[in-house]
Image (cartoon, rainbow, N blue to C red):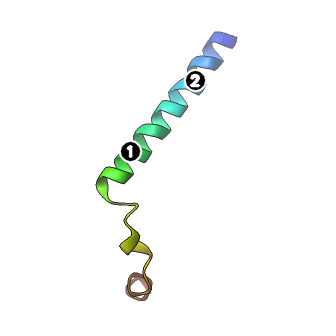
Amino acid sequence: MKRGLKLAVALFVLAACVVFAAALAGGLMDDRAFTPAAKDAAH
């Protein structure tokens, strides 16, 4: 049971890293997304 739990945690961490890397590669973390102009356009 502990082995399965460790595997699940490892897979979760790996998935989180992949999602974060994809967000960086896709520009989701672009600073321009947090400018006042972007906030005005969102409203």
Q: CA distance from mark 2 to mark 1?
A: 20 Å
- Check whether the beta carbons of the residues at disc 2 and disc 1 lie within 8 A of each other: no
Q: Residues within 10 Å of mark 1 (few under 14, many from 20)?
A: few
Where residue 30 appears, x then y in whole percent?
A: 37, 65
SS type, badge 2: helix
Q: Which residue is mark 2?
A: 8
Residue for point 53% across, 33% down: 13
SS type, badge 1: helix
The relative height of residue 26 versus residue 42 in the rendered view (above or below) is above
- Quarter-of-image position of residue 34: bottom left
Quadrant of image for the C terminus: bottom left
The relative height of residue 10 versus residue 37 in the rendered view (above or below) is above
Where residue 38 appears, x then y in whole percent?
A: 39, 82
Where residue 18 appears, x then y in whole percent?
A: 40, 38
Q: Is residue 33 left or right of residue 2?
A: left
Q: Which mark is residue 6?
A: none
Q: Which residue is mark 1?
A: 21
Where residue 1 appears, x then y in whole percent?
A: 69, 10
Q: First in sequence: mark 2 or mark 1?
A: 2
**Furthest residue toward front:** 31
Please state the total of marks drawn on the protein image: 2
